[in-house]
Image (cartoon, rainbow, N blue to C red):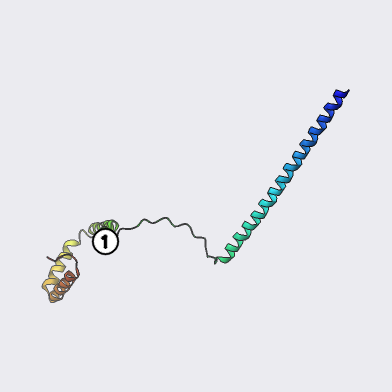
Amino acid sequence: MAKAKKSKAKKSKAKKSKAKKAKKSIRRAAAASRGKAKKSKARKAKKTARKAAKPKAAAPKKAAPKKKKQAVGEGDYQASRSFLKDQANFVKRHAAEIPAMGKEAETALEGPEGGALRAAEDEARNHSKASGE
């Protein structure tokens, strides 16, 4: 009988210790959740303060794609490509008209406005970086 009482006592102590551990874990969880709740409330308050400080935009802006640094000057390859493309398109569109345009320019140089055209050509050549012909 003594043996049975000891085992019952051990069982009850084990139950009590399990109950204490469970209560402690519940308390810890509750304390942690309260701390998290306080932190989350503080974060929400900061967010609302930031939103209030920012001026309201008409529409939300999308993130602009990152732009690569563009080479400018002699190494401006994009400008060169677009110029050549435009030039080729002009020739394609006006292939039939180009000989007539040349004849008009020739008659204009030989006519009364030829002196003004040559003066304009010289002035443009003086502004140019390349040496003229």
Most foreground residue, 23 or 44: 23
Point out the image quarter for the C terminus.
Answer: bottom left
Q: Residue furthest right?
A: 1
Indicate left or right for 68 with 55 as reference.
left
Q: Residues within 10 Å of mark 1 (few under 14, many from 20)?
A: few
Q: Quadrant of the N terminus?
A: top right
In this image, 28 relative to 54: left or right? Answer: right
Residue under label 1, please give it.
73
Q: Label 1 is placed on what type of residue?
A: Gly
Residue 7 vertical position relative to residue 98 in the rendered view, above or below: above
- Location of residue 4 by image quarter: top right
Where does the image place residue 77, in percent across and percent down from the top left? 27, 56
Identity of the residue drawn at 77% across and 39% down = 20
Does residue 21 lie above or below 133 as drawn? above
Image coords of residue 42 (percent x, y): 64, 58
The quarter of the picture where residue 110 lies is bottom left
**Number of numbered callouts drawn:** 1
**Viewer-proximal residue, 33 or 124?**
33
Task: Please name the residue shown 52% across and 60% down the image.
Answer: 60
Residue drawn at 57 percent across, 62 percent down: 50
Could you say where residue 34 lies in the image, as x and y percent from the top left? 70, 51
Q: Which element type, helix, strand or loop, lies under badge 1?
A: loop
Q: Residue at x 60, y 63 (%)?
A: 49
Q: Position of residue 109 (x, y in %)?
A: 13, 71
